[in-house]
Image (cartoon, rainbow, N blue to C red):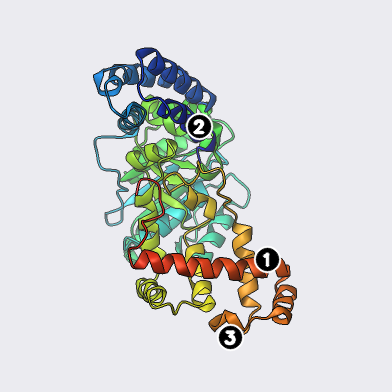
Amino acid sequence: MFDNITARLSEIFRKLGRKAKLSKKDVEKGLKDIRLALLEADVNYKVVKEFIARLEKSATGERVLKSFTPGETLLKVVYEELRDFLSTKKKIEIKADGRPGVVMLIGLQGSGKTTTAVKLANFLRKKGKRSLLVPCDLKRPAAVEQLKIMAEQNNLSFYEIKEKTVVKIGKGALESAKKECLTPVILDTAGRLHIDDVMLEELVQLKKLLSPKEVLLVLDSMTGQDAVNIGLEFQKKVDFDGTVLTKMDGDARGGAALSLKYVTGKPIKLIGTGERPDDLELFHADRMASRILGMGDISTLIERAEEVIDKEEAEEAAKKFKEDRFTLEDFRKQIKMVKKLGPLEKLAGMIPGMKSMGQMDVDDDAIKRIEAIINSMTVDERGNPKVINGSRRKRIAIGSGTTVREVNRLLKDFEMMKKMMKQFSKGKIGFPFPGK
């Protein structure tokens, strides 16, 4: 997410950070570079013009030019402006209450509406909601079947349609949701390859009939500036309460995210960050600004960890580290918990400074190899690695499909990690993240 723009901006601030003092000319050059980075990231040119104009007012003042750490101060100024640029005065939330409440997803074909419907139902389930997924796309072949299969895979309620029109499906779904005490009703509406009058009229009728609490425009973030034009068209004909940006994990530029809110005036409410059913997040302007500038997103990382990591197991692992009882079996359990958080590359983007460290090799395949090596060990070997002699190392390497060298490296790294974590737990060395 935002890899290209983050790399460019990080380089700009790295250069400015080397200077003990910044002149007005230095700042102007930095702003020019930021402008170019935004344009290359496919940010709408009107948005870039407005954003740079706002930056010029705050970045060329005494706060930056007379600061003892001008590079850091300028970075903070850019962060504040970017955060305010992306934010909305109202708290970002999904209105799903009612008897039943209705959430209507609209957008073009291929934007990710069906996947988003399932992700949203999963997202709301964590908040105690029991959603009803309703297929309202009667045009695309197998669209109804696709939603049904995904609902079954995720143990979600699905409305079996008997009606032949979208309006009748909407009415029937509401009655069914009332009887089964389900809310909200999530409508997966039909899209087209382009915006047309027939599609828009169908959406207008459905909205008028069901009075949804939320109308969310689902947009593929990889469409760049086209997402802005699509957003304006839907706003003009149907109107909506907020947007959902999908495929954010595959968008290295990020132009749509930076343009949409400003151009449409509608908040970005949710972002899709992967293919898993849980890869849907509430949009937080401050966190997004931090990610874009390469400053990480510790808040989201902590929230995700609290959802998937067993607190008692984590505390037990910390205790074992402190008492020097941590084994390779414990390490294997920790790897399984970390994998629940998502791909390592995504996690690295949430840790301040991690993505900008050139020597850091973020590799999910390496984790798989480590797991394979540990899985090839006996229970005794996991509990006491010191018994692993030369012949055992060869056996483990063959069993895991790796090499003796990789087995040796794991055993060496494991011992080093144990020593470091023991020192951390005793407070002998500081926390290993930048700025700590």
Disc ID at residue 379: 3
Which residue type carries mark 3?
Val
| Crowdedness near tag 3: few (<14), some (14–19) or many (≥20) residues, C-alpha within 10 Å | few
| Crowdedness near tag 2: few (<14), some (14–19) or many (≥20) residues, C-alpha within 10 Å | many
Q: Looking at the image, which residue is at 28% across and 20% down? A: 58
* Residue of label 1: 406
Disc 2 vs disc 1: Cβ atoms closer than 8 Å?
no
* Residue of label 2: 5
Discs 3/2, front: 3
Describe the element under mark 2 as helix, strand or loop: helix
The x, y position of residue 249, in whole percent, is 53, 45
**Residue 184 in view:** yes
When the figure is inspected, residue 88 is found, relative to residue 59, above or below; the finding is below
Q: Looking at the image, which residue is at 65% across and 72% down? A: 373
The x, y position of residue 79, in whole percent, is 34, 32
Q: Earlier in the sequence, mark 1 or mark 3?
A: 3
| Crowdedness near tag 1: few (<14), some (14–19) or many (≥20) residues, C-alpha within 10 Å | some
Residue 59 falls left or right of residue 392 = left
Residue lying at the far bottom of the rendered structure: 380
Q: Earlier in the sequence, mark 2 or mark 1?
A: 2
Describe the element under mark 1 as helix, strand or loop: helix
Q: Could you give the CA–CA distance between mark 1 and mark 3, rounded to whole angstroms?
A: 20 Å
